[in-house]
Amino acid sequence: MLKWNDVLSLSEQGVAPVEQAIEKTSEEWRALLSSEQFHITRHSGTESPFSSTMCSLFKRGIYRCTCCHVAGEETRLFDASEKFDSGTGWPSFTQPLIPNAVAYNKDSSQGMVRIEAICNTCKAHLGHVFPDGPEPSGLRYCINAISLHKISSSIDNDACD
């Protein structure tokens, strides 16, 4: 289980590489994504809080990277069992599905130091990680819903949210 000090360390040292990275030019990403997806995932944008119903959905399933999905890969980032209602207006998780699914960068862009969460496969901006989540990890992965593609669990066979 990752804790805040682990995330800080990984933001400096890096995470283990993935088996197959996705590399595309900006023009290639622009052709695959909507303008909003492109802005948020490729240019570190942020969607408006409470702009997605994904914040209030807690059905079983796996959250995958939107960019990887449109590129034909299915990079698994988060499990719905790690999702919680943070009240912030963005989907929030306590842990990534596997430790190297998410990579981390120090972000000083808004007059403060934050830790940016990015997809380790395609380098899409996902959101940020904060040390104010619930125990036992104490982490809050505050993720743009537009960066995520949810698939339902094969167990409950619900439609994708």
Image (cartoon, rainbow, N blue to C red):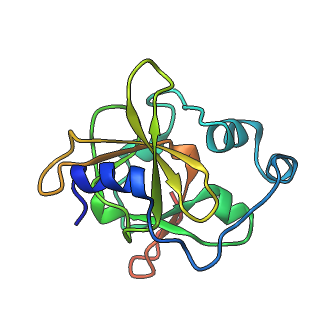
Decide if residue 141 is on the left or right side of residue 18. left
Residue at point 16%, 48% (across, down):
134
Residue 21 % position (x, y): 65, 70
Quadrant that contains the N terminus: bottom left
Q: Is 11 positioned to the left or the right of 146 in the image?
A: left
Above or below: residue 159 compared with residue 124: below
- In the displayed structure, would residue 38 be above or below residue 76? above
Between residue 37 and residue 120, name the one nearer to us: 120
Residue 140, percent from left and from top: 29, 45
Residue in the image at 27% along x and 54% along y: 94
| Figure label count | 0
Q: Residue at x 70, y 66 (%)?
A: 22
**Residue 123 position in % (x across, y down):** 61, 55
Which residue appears farthest toward the front when viewing the image?
A: 13
Q: Residue furthest left?
A: 135
Q: Quadrant of residue 100?
A: bottom left
- State whether residue 4 is above or below residue 112: below
Drawn side of residue 5 relative to residue 50, left or right:
left
Against 17, residue 55 (above or below) is above
| Residue lying furthest top | 111
53 or 64, nearer to the observer: 64
Q: Position of residue 58 (x, y in %)?
A: 34, 56
Based on the displayed image, in which of its 4 quarters is residue 10 positioned? Answer: bottom left
